[in-house]
Image (spheres, rainbow, N blue to C red):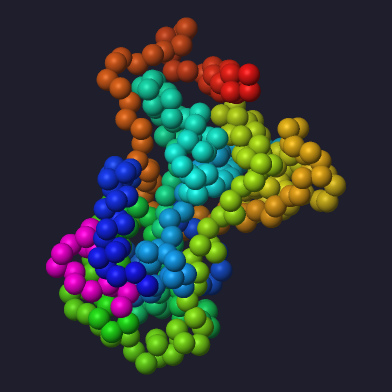
Amino acid sequence: MATLAELRAKLKSQEDSTGPSRQSSGGGDKAMYPFWNIPNDTTAVLRFLPDGDNDNTFFWQERQIIRLTFPGVKGQDENREVTVNVPCMEMWDNTGSCPILSQVRPWFKDPSMEAIGRKYWKKRAYIFQGFVSADPMNEEDKPENPIRRFVINPSIFKLIKAALMDPEMEELPTDYTSGTDFRLTKTQKGQYADYSTSNWARKERTLSEVELEAIEKNGLFHLKDFLPKKPGATELEVIKDMFEASVDGQLYDVSKWGEYFRPYGIDAPAPGTTATPQSQPASQPAVSQPVAPAAPATPPKAEEDALPQPPSPSATTNEDGGKPKAEDILAMIRQKKTQDQS
């Protein structure tokens, strides 16, 4: 387990190399605690625990996804918008490794394209684990293992990180004897939930015998196990194909992409009915894709990851003097693809 000093040093090095973040959540099995469903003006008390993976300096894992929207599903409900979450390659590799963001980054140089750039920009979330010491929902169907997982959005993470960098915090909040609970408070700001008044408890708290026994009995999760699977060559071709189709306003095609990535509630295609990406051999093994989780009943306020800063020159427009059209953007994407292949 890393010390607080080691954790601070790594956080500081990330800030120095990537710059400050400006500013997503999901469901799943019962281990996931849906804090976004707590009533307004209430507080859930969480006690974060270390990652079961001792190689992880932090007690969280960062997740990066990109949301691809489609106007409907081909051959099914073609009039209900659906979203497919795909992993961003920059979660594992260096900047520039993601086939979507490599296309999107240049759009921020043109203010007229910034809006669509934001739409396809990556969204970050942070996976933690720990106990729920106080639950305003009074869950009835709790999992047998009291160690829960939390998908924390960037605004809450910013509060957690700020306290960790505060020299007045002398012990790791995950320490079993000298740790600190996190008080997650939900209020309402307009139509969105607001968690800005959340903070760390003022007093340290030693874990109870029941909590220590739960750790001894169940062990700690390896948080990296709950990240998406890293895409291979076939999956990257599928992601690029879906991205272009999404920009073009096409319907989601289960027969083309359903074996790899699909919206929540859409079944996988029957065996033998899927198309193979043209640039990949037919024998390329397929991967199993976790479907996107159901949206929270009251979703947190939409947030964005740090975006490329557009330049100050005036906006560029298309020939009609308006915003770029989908076909114009697709032409740019395909032109770049041709240049990359030549």
231 shown above or below 143: above
Main SS of residues in magenta: loop
Over which residues does the magenta segment extend? 162-175
181 shown above or below 108: below
Q: Quadrant of the C terminus?
A: top right
Whether residue 182 is visible: no
Q: Residue at x 83, y 51 (%)?
A: 271
Q: In which quarter of the image is the N terminus?
A: bottom left
- Residue sitting nearer the eye, 174 or 266: 174
Query: Quick one: which residue is furthest to the left in this view?
Result: 168
In the image: residue 268, left or right of residue 4 = right
In the image: residue 289, left or right of residue 127 = right
Whether residue 173 is visible: yes
Q: Residue at x 29, y 64 (%)?
A: 6
Q: In which quarter of the image is residue 73?
A: top right
Say if the magenta span includes residue 288.
Answer: no
Q: Which residue is drawn at 15% across and 64% down?
A: 167
> x and y percent of residue 104 in the render?
47, 30
> x and y percent of residue 14 in the render?
32, 50
- Residue sitting nearer the eye, 334 or 172: 172
> x and y percent of residue 220 in the render?
47, 76
